Image (spheres, rainbow, N blue to C red):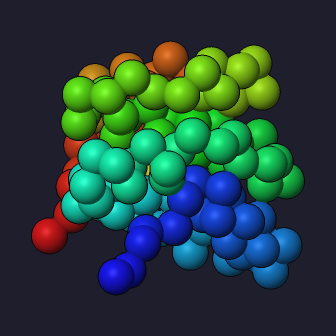
């Protein structure tokens, strides 16, 4: 039986991607967590998020991982783990993930609260999967 990787394992992979300069793949790993969490059983879900991941080397990705965990938990009716509220999981400056000024207004409107409260703004399709 396949067990989905925990957020700790995802953070390790994200960190490695960032060291290698592959921010795009790091982003895909972070957002893919939502799908992996959604498709897991409630018992597996808890094990995926209970341990706090270490730092990735990027405050933006540290906050992003907390946002995807909080979003996934709330969307599936589970309380998020306490570590998502740690101060290191929030940004001092806004981060528009799409990095296109023309999409900033859409991101401001469509970002789930789990993201926007951390200063992260994503476009409406960022959290959907096929």
Is residue 71 something one can see in this rendering? Answer: yes
Q: Is residue 100 visible?
A: no
The C terminus: image quadrant: bottom left
Which residue is more in the foreground, 48 or 15?
A: 48
**Is 97 drawn above or below residue 40 in the view shown?**
above
The residue nearer to you, when weighing 29 against 38, is: 38
Please name whichever residue, 123 or 18, is drawn nearer the observer in this view of the structure.
18
Question: Closest to the observer: 28 or 83?
Answer: 83
**Is residue 23 depicted above or below 108 in this figure?**
below
Taking the spot 38% from the left edge, 80% from the top edge, the residue there is 2
Would you identify the image quadrant in which residue 110 lies? top left
Q: Quadrant of residue 44?
A: bottom left
| Residue 46 appears left or right of 81 | left
In the image, residue 59 above or below residue 26? above
Residue 91 lies left or right of residue 95; in this view the side is right
- Residue 19, given in percent of the width and then of the height, sits at 84, 73
**Horizontal and vertical percent for residue 76?**
23, 36
Q: Position of residue 26 (x, y in %)?
A: 60, 67
């Amino acid at each position: 039986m396949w067990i989905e990787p925990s957020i700790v394992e995802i953070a390790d992979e994200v960190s490695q991607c960032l060291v290698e300069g592959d921010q795009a793949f790091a982003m895909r790993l972070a957002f893919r967590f939502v799908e992996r969490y959604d498709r897991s059983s409630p018992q597996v879900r808890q094990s995926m998020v209970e341990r706090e991941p270490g730092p990735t080397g990027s405050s933006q990705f540290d906050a992003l991982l907390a946002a995807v965990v909080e979003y996934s938990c709330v969307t599936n009716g589970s309380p998020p783990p306490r570590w998502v509220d740690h101060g290191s999981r929030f940004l001092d400056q806004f981060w528009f993930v799409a990095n296109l000024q023309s999409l900033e207004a859409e991101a401001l409107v469509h970002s789930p609260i789990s993201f926007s409260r951390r200063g992260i703004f994503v476009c409406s399709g960022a959290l959907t999967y096929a």
